[in-house]
Structures are given as C-alpha cells and as structure tokens.
Image (cartoon, grey):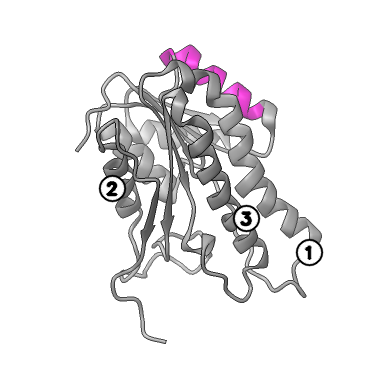
C-alpha cells in the first residue's frame, strides 16, 4: 500500500485497540515504530509483540514534559520522527448533570491538551523530516452530538477544529495533517465488549490511515469519516 522503509512513526495510545493496529500496520509497511502507553509494561509488551525496530515507552500525553521525553527517545533511537499519530483518547459518557469536574478535565486534558503537547514536542523533528505527517484519530462524535457526550463531544469537536487549523498552519512546512473520524469501533474503549462484529474493526481504521498517507505529495485527504455499513437498527 505504501513503502515506509526508513521512516519513523510515533503512535500515542499504541498498546491496544486502534493504536496497536496502527502500530502493527505502520510496521508492516516498513516503518520504525514508537508506541506509547501510560503503562511502561503495556508499552513494552505491545512493542515486543510487533517485533524488531519497535520501541514501547511510557508517556502520559497530559504531561508536556513526558511528550518531550517521548520525542527525544524516538530521535535518539531512530534518528527522527516522520509520522505522528495522535491516537490516545479517553471517553467518559455521562450527562452534564452527572459528570464530575474531574471526569470533564480528564477528557479535555487527554483528548485535546495531549494532542497539542505531543504535536508541539514533535514539530522540530517533523519539520526536519521529508514529507511528514500528523494524523489525529478523532470520531464521528467530532460532528454528531449525543446525549451523555457532553465531555467527549466537546473534546472531539475541538480536535476537529484543531486539526484543520494545524493543517493550514503547517502545510508550507512540509507537514500534512489529517483527521480520521470513525464511528463505532469493535474495541473495549466504551466498555461494551469486543463482540460487535457489525462494528468497524481496528484494522479498518489503520487501513484508512495508510490510504490517506499513500496519496501523492501534492494531495491531501484532510478528513475521513468512517461508519459501520450496517449497524443494528434502532
């Protein structure tokens, strides 16, 4: 699909779910892969499962210094960063009547602040790279509000706006920025189990990312919406 030999990709939240599928897919196309998790054990186990030229490191994206350290480790190990996949995310699904201040802040800090901090940390390396990419993993919740989504919707609407502004800010620095917005994905992200075969599979999201990155250098698919083709009828 795309030859990423010699290039380095960093995937936040890469130890499970969509992030792990992304790390696997990038590695399969020849990339060196750095994947992060808040747990060093989970990151290292995931990296070992993918194979050679994969580095798993602990990083809480809510901490700007941790993001800077993750980029420094990537540059030290592989010489640079060419691709940044901001995938780490958090969802707490409660109405505004029920949501606590701590739950609100945890979503905003992870889903918005984390993307900002990691992108800021990565920019020097990305600007030095040849044909760099930032791909943010959003959600259809970036456009479609739902009851119980007060915090999640706010963070994902914000991520869409941030990505589109980022794309305009960085296009003349040789960096293409895009957002992938899946609907229901068959992971345990929302604690509903992994038996929803009708849902989008994590690998489908990874395929979409590779498809976007495979476009010619003068072309940018900046926003992709992905839906289950036949979800259960309501």
Q: Position of residue 174 (x, y in %)?
A: 41, 24
The Cα atoms of the two marked residues, 2 and 1, are separated by 36 Å
Q: Eyeballing the image, is 116 above or below 9?
A: below
Instruction: Determine the secondary structure under disc 3.
Output: helix
Q: Which residue is mark 1?
A: 100
In magenta stretch: residue 78: yes
Q: Nearer the viewer, residue 4 or 130?
A: 130
Q: Eyeballing the image, is 39 above or below 51?
A: below
Q: Position of residue 102 (x, y in %)?
A: 78, 56
Q: Main secondary structure of the magenta part?
A: helix
Q: Nearer the viewer, mark 2 or mark 3?
A: 3
Horizontally, is 112 left or right of 27 in the view? right
Horizontally, is 162 left or right of 212 in the view? right
Q: Which residue is mark 3?
A: 155
Of pointers 2 and 3, the one earlier in the residue sequence: 3
Q: Which residue is mark 2?
A: 207
Query: Residue visible at 51% across and 42% down?
Result: 13
Q: Nearer the viewer, residue 185 or 168?
A: 168
Callout 3 environment at 10 Å: few (<14), some (14 to 19), or many (20+)? many
Instruction: Determine the secondary structure under disc 2.
Output: helix
Instruction: Read off the magenta span.
Output: 66-79
Q: Quadrant of the N terminus?
A: top left
């Amino acid at each position: 699909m795309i030859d990423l030999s010699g290039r380095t990709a960093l995937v936040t939240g890469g130890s499970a779910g969509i992030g792990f599928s992304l790390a696997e897919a990038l590695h399969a196309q020849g990339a060196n892969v750095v994947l992060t998790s808040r747990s060093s054990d989970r990151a290292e186990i995931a990296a070992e499962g993918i194979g050679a030229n994969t580095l798993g490191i602990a990083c809480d994206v809510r901490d700007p210094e941790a993001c800077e350290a993750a980029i420094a480790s990537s540059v030290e190990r592989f010489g640079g960063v060419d691709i940044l996949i901001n995938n780490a995310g958090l969802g707490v699904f409660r109405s505004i009547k029920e949501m606590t201040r701590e739950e609100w802040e945890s979503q905003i800090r992870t889903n918005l602040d984390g993307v900002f901090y990691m992108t800021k940390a990565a920019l020097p390396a990305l600007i030095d790279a040849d044909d760099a990419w930032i791909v943010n993993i959003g959600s259809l919740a970036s456009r479609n509000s739902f009851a119980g989504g007060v915090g999640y919707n706010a963070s994902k609407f914000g991520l869409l706006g941030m990505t589109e502004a980022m794309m305009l800010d960085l296009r003349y620095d040789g960096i293409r920025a895009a957002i992938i917005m899946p609907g229901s994905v068959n992971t345990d992200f929302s604690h509903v189990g992994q038996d929803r075969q009708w849902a989008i599979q994590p690998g489908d999201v990874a395929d979409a990312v590779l498809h976007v990155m495979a476009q010619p250098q003068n072309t940018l698919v900046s926003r992709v919406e992905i839906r289950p083709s036949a979800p259960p009828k309501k």
